[in-house]
Amino acid sequence: MPTSSRTLIAGIGAKDHLCAMKLISFNVNGIRASVGKGLHATLHQLDADIVCFQETKATPEQVATALGGVNGYHVHANGALKAGYSGTAIASKEKPLDVQRGIGVNEHDDEGRVVTCVFKDVVTVCVYTPNSGEGLKRLSYREKWDAAFRAYVNNLATGKLPVIVTGDLNVAHQPIDIARPKENYNKTSGYTQQEIDGLSSLLDTGWVDTFRHLHPGVVKYSWWSQRLGARAKNVGWRIDYVLVNKGFEKQVKNAFILNEVMGSDHCPVGIEW
């Protein structure tokens, strides 16, 4: 791990005494590959209470093996029917009271995109939202997904526990969230009006984007293309989020994006509360 990453992680690794819990979300772009790039050391340094992974590209058994021995985490994963594709997982220091894989809609649950853990004080939903694909071929499917997922999390929010929805939402919500908005608007997957509206509709039903709530004017990205040196030039997109249901944002003390943590084309994002 580069020195800059170690320094950055050290600065956020030790929880503030006012913050009781820390959650990290990280699209690892292949969890077994990420382990080979230092994921275990990163997790030890970050010392999060809950870690949500997207795009594990592995079966639940493979995820458990890849994360074996790290921080004593309880690991619960969801895998796609297609080998080496998609996949999500939640690793937590606290054993969850309940675990649900998928959103209960057969059309959407074959790709392993959601895993939900109920803890004693909070419900955590880890999601890897479908990409609309090259040429926007899956855009109509994406719109169906957004509506179904919104219904799923809004139902969870009717319970007594606060809910955290986190992961790769595969959309840059505002021009501030993408380095080149004009060049990509309505042309590139992840920045079409339909996808923007999908996230807006979710936020409008009572969810708060924690990073933008606490840092309204900060330009920071969480994903960079692996082509043309995009990360080195910081030509990126903010497509990884931590959302909380309205009211819970008052308890969130910190929201962050760890740009300098390597090991994937994404970087970790998270909150402390």
Image (tube, grey):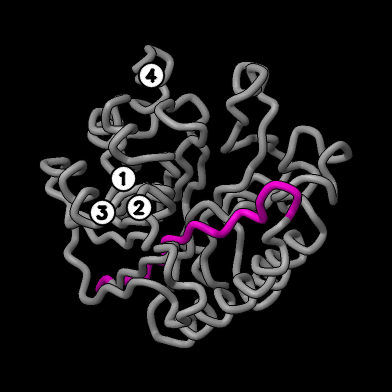
Q: Residue at x 66, y 23 (%)?
A: 234
Q: How far apart are marks 1 and 3 (CA)?
A: 23 Å
Q: What element carries label 2?
A: loop
Of the residues shown, which amino acid type is indicated by label 3?
A: Ala
Q: Mark 2 highlights which residue?
A: 83
Counting residues from the start of the chain, the first of labels 4 and 1 encountered is: 4
Q: Which residue is drawn at 51% across and 41% down?
A: 256
Of the residues shown, which amino acid type is indicated by label 2?
A: Ala
Q: Is mark 4 on a helix, strand or loop?
A: helix
Q: Which residue is drawn at 44% across and 63% down?
A: 111
Q: Nearer the viewer, mark 3 or mark 2?
A: 2
**10 Å crowding of disc 3: few (<14), some (14-19), many (20+):** many
Q: Is residue 125 found inside the magenta-colored segment of the image?
A: yes
Specify the label residue 91 is tagged with.
3
Quarter where residue 220 is shown: top right
Counting residues from the start of the chain, the first of labels 2 and 4 encountered is: 4
Q: How far apart are marks 4 and 1 (CA)?
A: 20 Å
Q: Nearer the viewer, mark 4 or mark 1?
A: 4
Q: Mark 4 highlights which residue?
A: 7
